[in-house]
Amino acid sequence: MIAMQGSSMTTQPLLHSLPLFPLGTVLFPDGVLPLRIFEVRYLDMIGKCRKADAPFGVVSLTSGSEVRKAGAEAESFAAVGTLAVIRQFDSPQSGLLQIECVGTQRFRVRAAELQKYGLWVAEVEAVAEDTALGIPGDLQHTATALRRLVDTLEERRRAQGAEALRLPVGAPYRFDDCGWVANRWCELVPMQLELRQRLMELDSPLMRLELVSDLLARAGITE
């Protein structure tokens, strides 16, 4: 299903025949993505990915919808996406999958093809991972606010039971890293899909966090 040059995208960036899942969201590296799947094209794709222990690519829709409908606008999607790895898998009934994925490597689509049954496959290359970068003092409030939010959610989950509340932020936590903190806020703060996509594509984690800080201030989340 997937042909890869070398052992990983980090060492060899070309990945061939990557199945794509166009969605009305943006997946960030280390982001948590729950999915409820019932379309035949994606049931088959997820089944094969799980069997092969292989990733699929999440790309943000720019036109069309997540579910195919007769006469609907054709699907198109952003050129930069994120690999998703399945970490929880459940099939509560025939024709339905409930999975939870985590984002790993960003990639850029070089060529994409729509197959007979509506599944997109692509040749992609890796986008460089964020450089680990400590949070400067003038942006420390973004990490403090995120830690406070996570602590509150964890306390609520403990009070309600482990299964009662799924945290939107996955461990391990890296509150001292610019890119990680920026990415988590990009997932949590309401914003237009196009802006979220642009933030994900930014090469500089520091610039991403600076822009996030502005968004938080406008939303009254931080001072």
Image (cartoon, rainbow, N blue to C red):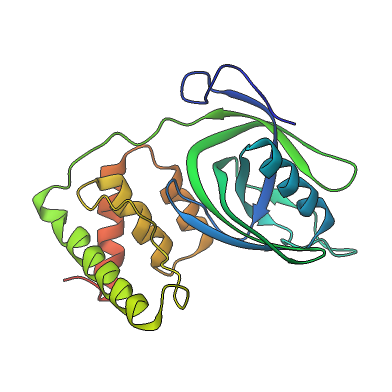
Foreground pick, 104 / 65: 104
Quarter occupied by residue 5 = top right
Q: Is residue 65 above or below residue 177?
A: below
Foreground pick, 178 / 100: 100
Residue occupying the point 39% across, 57% down: 170
Foreground pick, 64 / 158: 158
- Toward the front, the furthest residue is 161
Q: Position of residue 63 (x, y in %)?
A: 70, 57
Q: Position of residue 35 (x, y in %)?
A: 62, 61
Residue occupying the point 74% across, 37% down: 121
Q: Is residue 101 above or below residue 169?
A: above
The quarter in which the N terminus is drawn is: top right
The quarter in which the C terminus is drawn is: bottom left
Q: Position of residue 84 (x, y in %)?
A: 56, 45
Q: Is residue 66 above or below residue 159?
A: above
Foreground pick, 37 / 145: 37
Q: How many marks?
A: 0
In the picture provided, is 46 more to the left or to the right than 138? right
Q: Is residue 216 above or below residue 202?
A: below
Residue occupying the point 22% across, 39% down: 133
Q: Position of residue 83 (x, y in %)?
A: 55, 41
- Toward the left, the furthest residue is 137
In the picture provided, is 67 more to the left or to the right than 199? right
Quarter occupied by residue 124 = top right
